[in-house]
Image (cartoon, coloured by chain):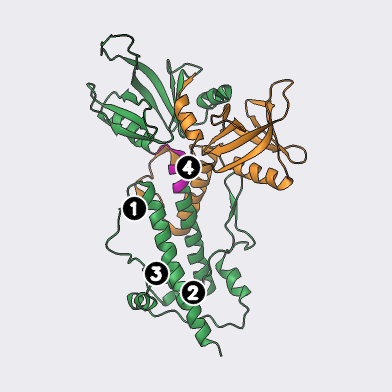
Amino acid sequence: MRYNERELLFLARQPAEKAAEILMRLPKKGSVLKKRLVKLVVNFLFYFRTDEAEPIGALLLEHCRIIKEEENVFSISFVEEPERKYCFECDSEEQCQEWIEALKRASYEFMRRCLIFYRNEIQKMTGKDPLEQYGISEEARFQLGTHKQ
Amino acid sequence: MKLNERSVAHYATCDSPADHAGFLRKRVERHHHHAHHHHATSYQRHWFVLKGNLLFYFEERESREPVGLVVLEGCTVELCEAAEEFAFAIRFDDAGARAYVLVADGQAAMEAWVKALSRASFDYMRLVVRELEKQLEEASKTLAACHKSPRRSSSSGRKRHLSNPALLPLQEKPTVLENGYSTWGSGGGVPGGAAGLDRDGGHTKPPPLPPRRRSAASSAVGSPVPSLSPAMPESPVSPETACFSKLHSWYGQEIAVLRREWQERQKRGHP
């Protein structure tokens, strides 16, 4: 599958929602934990060798599961392959929880669900569709009921 | 750079609904080798699917795997002065990045695509969510005020919920859970306002409503509270990113000023 790698690399240089040096292990067999600079930008998680400017990899964070594993450790896996886990070992339990929270909220689909929820609640409370004044109430991406996940 | 392509492809083809889909012709970008100056532009027709901030394209509508992906961050979408009618381009902030030139089947299709693509970025979605989050807080506060002090409901003024100093700002933001449903801190059904009043202790009389001489009050305080009516820099109708945050800090400033006024009055009023 072709993709605009150059733009993805550009994205990796943008201000991050969250970044830290964390031990990371790929789902490949025989993989070991390696220290990586891990950077969350929009719905992508980039990971770099700690002294390099260009990421070695990127994970699109849609339809993924963020799971707390053992102490200080969380994993990212994807719904179609739940056993293939990217593992991250943090410095502390606190850091681990922070990353879990941040990653759970990092998907576009998550934001969409929030938006639909807020829109619905506001409409119930005020009787008005809050998106109407912005002229975007008909946009497919904001519709109730069409995006059930 | 590696990408979790299998998962990305799965996301493209799974049954979660697309934000937009249709046939488009994509301009083929050729490298010009040597001294060839053939500018024969050719286009390839693909089935395009927009999901979130990702634009996928397939060989055929029924194809099981995307041929390609365009990540729609840091880009703008604009109409194109190409030789083709109904052409538009996705251009990136990254200088030197090549643009994607796409051609729709007709005027309506082109307009629909341009609209859908220009609102596809993660940042845009995030802004809208934050805006609604704020509006939900405001709506809740208004409801709380109405329930708590029915005798005030007769005092009119569209800014009443902002000028009522009994309303403390929410101490906690709602916790947004993974499934998108939020809980309202410790407030139970009625957030913010009610809890705040109780915390002040029942003995404090609710302060009087500030007089409705808004302009006089603001000039007395001397702070640059922007007036709400004219001279709005941008229309809130346009989905510009600058607009939402301006709106946000705008209202925030006004609330801050009114709270300060109330707090000063409260200090003076204490025996």
Q: Provide the residue designation for mark 2.
A: B165
Marks 3/1 same chain? yes
Identified at 37% across, 72% down, the residue is: B157
The residue type indicated by label 1 comes to Pro
Q: Main secondary structure of the magenta part?
A: helix
Q: Are marks 1 and 4 in contact (CB under 8 Å)?
A: no
Marks 4/3 same chain? no
**Residue B217 coordinates in the image, percent (x, y):** 37, 77
**Residue B93 coordinates in the image, percent (x, y):** 38, 35
Q: Which residues are magenta?
A: B119-128
Marks 1/4 same chain? no
**Residue B187 coordinates in the image, percent (x, y):** 62, 63
Q: Provide the residue designation for mark 3.
A: B159
Identified at 51% across, 62% down, the residue is: B140
Q: Provide the residue designation for mark 1.
A: B236
Give the Cα separation between the discs numbered 1 and 4. 23 Å
